[in-house]
Image (cartoon, rainbow, N blue to C red):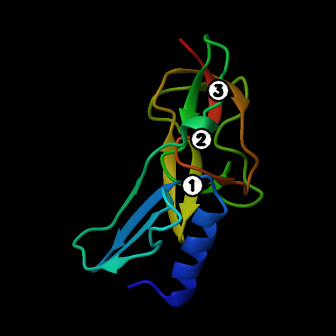
Amino acid sequence: MFTITEIKEIIKMVTESPVQHFALEQGNTKIVIDRVSANQSSPIAVPAAAEQITLKPNQEQKAEHPAEFQPILSTSVGTFYAASEPGADPFVKPGQKVMANTVVCVLEAMKLFNEIEAGITGEIVEVLCKDGEFVEYGQPLFLVKPE
């Protein structure tokens, strides 16, 4: 069950972002925010069975990068953390080699921390986000030069 404060924070995060559709299920509650039309209602709470976040990437936000580099994309909305805790070394730095299962960052959403793996073998070329920055689903986080 979501608290009123959590629901307000979700609504605020979605309305301040370019995300057009947001769905979240937790326990027996489901929140759906669909901003396709101003005439449609925003949050809807209905019974559900599983916890899940479903978002569609914002096509306008995907930046073009040199063809030889492949981006590592955000798998959810949330706060980007480059290290496991404040003051710790970042998971990866530019010039570092990564394997597909290398953890490159952590995304935090509603006090849930999700480790993001590179998903590709190569060398980190650039970190595209700042520590503590809010990121969108599908937003490029890193650029990798594939091997």
What crowding class fits label 2: few (fewer than 14 Cα within 10 Å), some (14-19), or many (20 or more)? many
Q: Are marks 3 and 2 in contact (CB under 8 Å)?
A: no
Q: Tell me which amino acid carries mark 1.
A: Leu
Per the image, label 1 sits on a secondary structure element best described as: strand
Per the image, label 3 sits on a secondary structure element best described as: strand
Residue 122: image location, x then y, percent: 56, 19
Q: Is residue 74 above or below residue 3?
A: above
Residue 8 lies in quadrant: bottom right
Residue at screen point 72% across, 43% down: 129
Q: Tell me which amino acid carries mark 3.
A: Leu
Q: Nearer the viewer's eye, disc 3 or disc 2?
A: 2
Farthest residue in the left direction?
Answer: 49
Q: Nearest the camera: 64 or 108? A: 64
Residue 59 lies in quadrant: top right
Q: Are marks 2 and 1 in contact (CB under 8 Å)?
A: no
Q: Are marks 1 and 3 in contact (CB under 8 Å)?
A: no
Q: Tell me which amino acid carries mark 2.
A: Gln
Q: Which residue is mark 1?
A: 107
What crowding class fits label 1: few (fewer than 14 Cα within 10 Å), some (14-19), or many (20 or more)? many
What crowding class fits label 3: few (fewer than 14 Cα within 10 Å), some (14-19), or many (20 or more)? many
Q: Which residue is mark 2?
A: 139
Q: Nearest the camera: 18 or 27? A: 18
Q: In the rendering, which numbered label is found on residue 143?
A: 3
Residue 15: image location, x then y, percent: 61, 65
Per the image, label 2 sits on a secondary structure element best described as: loop
- Residue at mark 3 to residue at mark 2: CA–CA distance: 11 Å
